[in-house]
Amino acid sequence: MPHHPTIAPAACALRPSVFASLASQLRTLERPPIPLHLGDAYRAPPEAARLERAAARLPANGYAYANPVGLEPLRDAVAARCAEDGLPGLTRDHVHVNVGATGAIQTALATWLQPGDEVLVCAPFWPLVKGMVLALGAVPVEVPFYARLRRGETVAAVLAPHVTPRTVALYVTSPNNPCGTVLTADQMQDLADFAIARSLWVVADEAYHHYVWSPHQHQFLAALPGMATRTATVFTASKSYALAGVRIGFLCGDPAWLDAARRVATHTVYNVPLVCQLSALGAIETGAPWIAETRALYEQARDLVVQRLDAPFDLPMGGAYVFADLGADLGDKPMLEFLSDLLRDGVSLSPGDAFGRDFRTWVRICYTSAPLADLATGINRLNGALERLRRSATATLGRPRTGTNG
């Protein structure tokens, strides 16, 4: 039991942000690097979502506390949009407005978990989820998942060896951040069957469900038989509508447990700022054409990276990232040293170990965070840095390059 000045072990177990180790170097650069480390969007959001437009919609008492559950017209709009996107049957009672997908996922986990509970975390994974589990005194169990499914292994074969009597929940994201895998309809059904057979809660992180590349298709896990009562469906205006700074996310689920989640949220953030909710409402009401246009631009960006990147990676099926393995070129060079050198070249990437313990030689490249011309420049600079490593290795050791695109 820690006393002053001892910090709680759960807090000590949390890792810094993905790019914190290089933040001091960022501040010394003469000009900002091309920001391919951020899971952000270079596009401006839909016109109706701009904050000045949202502020004009504020009621006379717009500076008062808002409904902790979320603005009713926004929750109605979310339910209607879910039906259009493939998740029917929701009403405003199934929707809670939270502080981004981050707040939504944390709220769901805090509603379900007790200290010592285990959560299967399908890897590679969005970095913050592991820390959320740890902060609740629960145990994140990393499961190498998406690459094994791409190789043809079944969901049950991959997950079952990691289940114990303490396993109570599962975290999965499709399209995946960072590797871009989109689970097939059969794989989603297998995942549903697995969760039902073992009485598991499921966090379905659907942050990138609007951005899936042909011929792949997105499937809401909660839409499958038996999953509506056990699934927290999470998505966010940050990714769908380029509103990351507005911090609006949605937690959707059965009111039987969502009512308890609302109490958890009330005791953490209370309510989300009303002007931010009005921004998200404007996006949902008018943003379908914007999403269609943005999807085409992002797929073009994905194709540019796929065609030009000179390192091994799995083809992204959706999302916003290419996840590349630089191990064949890094050799003994530490990843952070390489990323530091790359910063001096004017490009920033995310180190792979944030996404799981098996990815220390990997990097995440966000292809939605910079315009196409800047993205092309960034990839060229990354290729140049990798080529310098190869020339150095050949000169020193006489070894040829071994990496190939995947």
Image (cartoon, rainbow, N blue to C red):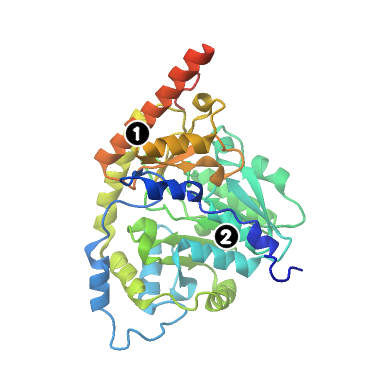
Disc 1 element: helix
Observer able to see residue 257:
yes
Image position of 82 (left or right of 173)? left
Distance from disc 2 to disc 1, alpha carbons, whole Å, reads 41 Å
Q: Which residue is mark 1?
A: 379
Q: Nearer the viewer, residue 339 or 249?
A: 339
Q: Which residue is mark 2?
A: 227
Q: Of the numbered discs in the image, which one, if any, rests on residue 124?
A: none
Image position of 91 with respect to 286: above or below: below
Q: How many numbered marks have been drawn onto this rendered protein structure?
A: 2
Residue contact at pointers 2 and 1, CB within 8 angstroms: no
Three-letter code for the amino acid on which mark 2 is drawn = Met
Q: Residue at x 29, y 35 (%)?
A: 376
Disc 2 element: loop
Q: N-terminal of the two: label 2 or label 1?
A: 2
Residue at the farthest bottom position:
61
Observer able to see residue 228:
no
